[in-house]
Structure formats: C-alpha cells, structure tokens
Image (cartoon, grey):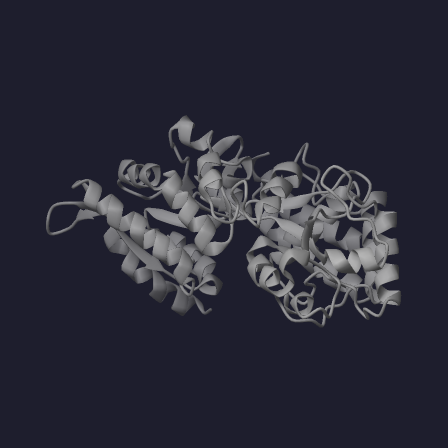
Amino acid sequence: MSAVGALALTACGQAGQGGTTSEDGRVQLTMWTHSAGNPAELEVYEQIIDDFNASQDEYEVIEESFPQGAYNDAIVAAAAADDLPCLLDMDGPIVPNWAWAGYIQPLGLPQEITDSLLPTAIGTYQDEIYSAGYWDAALAVLARKSVLEENDIRIPTIDDPWTIDEFDGALDTLQDAGYKTPLDIGAEDSGEWWPYAYSPMLQSAGGDLIDRDTMLSAEGALNGPEAVEFFTWFQEAFEKGWVSSSGTIGNEEFDKGEVALSYTGGWNALPSLEAAGDDLLFLPPPDFGKGPTIGGASWQWGISSTCESPEGARAYLEFSFQDKYVTAFADNQIVIPATEGATEASEYFGPEGDLRPFVELSQEYALLRPETPAYAVISSTFEKAGKDIMNGADVQSTLDGAVAEIDANIQSNDGYGF
C-alpha cells in the first residue's frame, strides 16, 4: 500500500485518542483492528463494544477495521503523524518492536487478568507487559488413522512423538505407497508463516533465530551445526519430493486425500474434520533432536503511547477479557482460548471438543518467537534464507549471510535496548 493510502486510512483516528467527547459527554476512544474481512471476529468485537458502551457512561469505544495487508502500514504512518488510536491490535511477535519504537505503552492491566492468560497470549519487552490477547493458535500434523495403519506407520503421541528418523521413514513409506508428495507443509505461503511454521523445526533441532541469552546476535544460533543440519534436511525434503511449494494455501490437498500428512494450524481443522471424520488424527510435530516445538503468540491488544485517556482504554480491555467473550472468539474463529474458563466452555476446545488436541499441543510445545525489536528483520531474513535454501542455495553460506544481515541491523540500532 502506498504511503498516501496509509495516511488516508489514519485520518479518521484523530477524533478518538481520548481527548474528545461525544454529544452525551463521553470520552471517545478509537480502536483499530486488522480484522476487516473477518466477520466472525468482528462480530465478537462489536458485541463487546456494544456491551461496554452500555455498561457505563464515561467512555465510548469506536471501532475501525482495516484489511490485514494494509494494517501495519497504517499504524506506522499514524505513528509518524502522532495520530495513533488509543486501542490497537498487533501480531504478538511485533510487540517488542512497537514498544521499543514508542508506539505503545505498558499495558497496566490488573495482574489477575494477565496471570489468567496463556503465557503465549502476553506480549513483553524488557520484562514488561505491553499487550494481551484473547487467543493463541497451534500447529499439528494432520493424518488419517487408516492411512498410517495400512502402511504400518506408528501413530505418535505427545509423550512419544516421531523421531526424525521415524518421520523420514514414514515419508519414504508413504511416497512408495503412491503419494507423490506425502507431506504438505504450506511452503507455497509467504510472510510470517515461514518463521512461524519452520523456525520451531529449527529450534527442535537445536538451532534458533537468535541467541536468546543476549538478543544481540544470531551467530551460532542460525548458522551453527544444528541449524545447518536442519536446513540440509529441509532442502533434501524438497529434492526428494517429500514436500512441495506448488500446492494451494490451506489444507485442500489433504482434505482431498492427495497428500497423506499436513502440517497446518487449527484454523484449518474443521474442513478436515468434515472431510475425514473419525479417521482424522491431530499429531505432534516430529522431534528433530531436542524435543518438538511449535510457534506461540497470535494477535494481541495494546494501548498507544499517545492515548490521552489510557485509563479508559484499560477499562475497556478489562471488560473485554470476560470468559464469555474469549470463548466466542475461540469458537467463531477456531483459535485456542487464552483463559482456562473460556477453554472449558468452548465447543471445539473444551474437554470433549473435537479440537482439544490443539490445546494440549500448545500447552506442551509452544515457544514464543524471540521477544526482541529485531524480530521484524529476523522474520523477513529467515523467510528469504529459507526460500533460497528450498530452491537449492548452499546452506552454510546462505545462513551466514542471514546472520550477517540480522546482526548488522541489531548493531545499527544499538542492540535495541539489550
């Protein structure tokens, strides 16, 4: 989106920074969300806002929604113009960058609320909470029980996942059984999917995106022996035809039975349940050597640093974290509820819910992406390196180049406060 377009999107935010009042004397608080085009999510927001506005007479929340593809540009442009709304949502991994840049202020919600949330639904920078979310998401390997049993492939469990040798053997067996591409890992997708989906595999192998002890360098984490070993496997998986980058985004190939396994998120699970029924399994990812890992953190809410009525923004957020709303988000969008009470009440994620395994996978394996302002650069650099390796580039030199780019960015920003 052009800068002119982004600035145009922000123009309506000026009336809701908490410094203006409605005709009936309420302080107006503008709330921006990335959810345009997602009616299931917007439906819940609209209910919360209606309920909050009716529950008191001091504040009026006014919601404005943007397409996800334009949202971050709008935020950056609004920040440059000192025109951010009071309330804004953000993808979990970007929270440290926006905190470091001064876009958002410490959240300041009561501890009983933040303590009730999944650890992956909290966004921090320098050990201070800046955001909180109503849900998280989780990845799993989807399979049909009948396919595994017909091919004498052991069904893994959370307590006993596939080793990488078992996983490789299963892929070979399934390919020999007639699946030209036995595994869909979504490699045709782009953007944040790449670090969200594939950096957990790297972490399972013993590598990482950055040295988390210092947050000052990717040296050794992203280009050490463990990282080279993982990305060599990754490259060979494409060369052997185990995986492909020519599919369709989503889970269509698995649902049609064209692939035997699919590494995907819970948000794709309902169509697969409809397609496979009781034959469907939600399996843990394989263990590359250091235990399985999946990505954690989804969209969360914060308060802008320029909000003139942060107490009103906090009052709205406190109101919004009621279990009934968290459950509604979960079941409308097919995402994991962030509170225990909401999880128990969820149709899909409760104790008897069809998607309960995603809750267990998240509890057991979820790992936040590195909580550093450098993550924006880490993410795009990882994606480029991963795609280059997928397409045949030398693994070691490609990873060395990615490390150099990440480290240069960190150094040019004086370590981002670490």
- Pick whichever, 159 or 406, lies toward us: 159
Query: Residue shown at 42%/65% (left/top)?
Result: 37
Q: Quadrant of the C terminus?
A: top right
- Pick whichever, 88 or 179, lies toward us: 179
Above-or-below relation of 356 to 143: above
Query: Residue shown at 42%/27% (left/top)?
Result: 111
- Looking at the image, can residue 57 be seen? yes
Residue positioned most to the top:
111
Image coords of residue 410 (percent x, y): 63, 44
Image coords of residue 335 (percent x, y): 51, 50
Q: Quadrant of residue 225?
A: top right
Residue positioned most to the left:
24
Image coords of residue 192 (percent x, y): 60, 56
Query: Residue shown at 76%/54% (left/top)?
Result: 401
Query: Residue shown at 41%/59% (left/top)?
Result: 40
Image coords of residue 304 (percent x, y): 37, 44
